[in-house]
Each structure stands twice: as C-alpha cells, then as structure tokens.
Amino acid sequence: MFVIGLTGSIAMGKSTTARMFAEAGVPVYDADAAVHRLYENEAATAIETTFPGTTRDGKVDRSALRERVTGDPPALRMLENIVHPLVGAAREKFLKEAAAAGARVAVLDVPLLFETGGDTRVDAVVVVSAPVEVQRARAVERGLSPGEFEALLARQMPDAEKRRRADFVVDTSRGLEPARQQVQAILKAVTNMPKRRG
C-alpha cells in the first residue's frame, strides 16, 4: 500500500483536498479528528492530571487547554508528549485496517506533518497551498483574528519551505474542479512511484 502524507498550512484548503481523496475511494486518516476523539476519551485523564481544570465531564475543554498552553512552549511539549503516542497508535491502526481492506493507496492528513517528522513515515508528500492573500482571507472568513492567524502561522513551517519539500503541490486558489483534477493526477502518478518508507 502506498501512503501519501497530506499537509498544508492553515486555511489552504487541506480539508477540502482530503475530502477529494476520500471521494476518489482512498481511505483518509484525519489527525485532527483523531486528536478530538482522544480528547473525549483516553487522553482526558492524563491531560487533567498535567493541566488541572482543563477538562469538563471527562472530556478536554479545548478552549481552556488552548488558553493554558498557548505561548508556553514547555507546556505545549508536555501536551504533545501525552497526545502524540496515542495519535501514533491510532494512525498505525488505521494503516493496518486500510491494508487489510486491500487499499492500494491511503492518505494521512496531518497538519504538522513536516514539523513532527511525519514526512519520514510516508511514501510521498502532498502539500496543499494557495497565495498568502487567499490564505489570509479564508482565515478571516473562519473567524480568526489577525493575531490568532499569525500565532498559528508561527507554529507552522513556512509555505514556501513545505512546497520545496513536497513531492506534489495542490494549488487550491483556482477553484474546486482544478484541485480535483490535481488530486486525480496525483493518484495516477503514485501508481508508478517507488515506496520510500522504511
């Protein structure tokens, strides 16, 4: 099974692109959704122990947790040390199930793929991108303040660097149909690419 890592900075259209892979019949693992599930189950106790007052009714209160770790790199590292191993186990379970179901290609949708070294665990990387003015407009549309947008960007590798390291780039600035055509072209291209995972 060929594993694609899908990534892109905030408001670039990554979720829409992930949906296009799913519509093409490719199993897609959503790292953000996996974290949300963990926040409602097995990660909650460890997070409450480490960051008292950040859960309610056995589930993580995401805004309280965000308030607690934002601007505090050691706290963020402590949170990542709790969550990342659980996310890794969920990802491996997904890949085993996809392979057992006979999938030829699977997609790992991971916002911080490069930042967490996830690019070494996939066979090819697809970066979703758009010009910065499009990205900023989309972020504002979502209700992010300029400060929140800049803070999120600061945690992510610059788009230019992601594009440089990508095997494929999906440009979402030209609309849905061109993006869908790019996804189809990628799926065709990877059938002839060698796997590079260890």
Image (tube, rainbow, N blue to C red):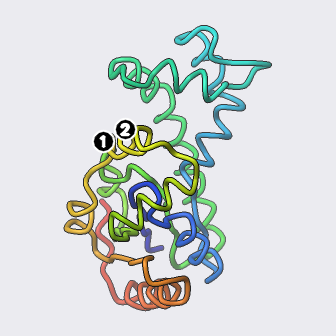
Q: Give residue 130's quadrant in the image.
A: bottom left
Q: How many marks on residues?
A: 2
Above or below for 75 versus 142: above
- Secondary structure beneath label 2: helix
In depth, the one of 94 and 96 nearer the eye is 94
Q: Determine which residue is flagged by label 2.
A: 151
Q: Amino acid at mark 2?
A: Ala
- Residue at 48% across, 89% down: 178
The crowding category of the residue bearing disc 1, from other C-alpha atoms within 10 Å (few below 14, some 14 to 19, many at least 20), is few
- Secondary structure beneath label 1: helix
- Residue at 44% across, 54% down: 10
Farthest residue toward the right?
57
Q: Give residue 86's quadrant in the image.
A: top right
How far separated are the C-alphas under marks 2 and 1?
Answer: 5 Å
Q: Amino acid at mark 1?
A: Ala
Q: Position of residue 173 (x, y in %)?
A: 43, 77
Residue 154's disc number: 1
Q: Position of residue 197 (x, y in %)?
A: 32, 63
- Residue at 52% across, 45% down: 144
Evaluate if marks 2 and 1 touch, with contact meaning CB atoms under 8 Å apart. Answer: yes
Q: Position of residue 186 (x, y in %)?
A: 41, 85
- Residue at 58% across, 53% down: 142
Residue 86's disc number: none
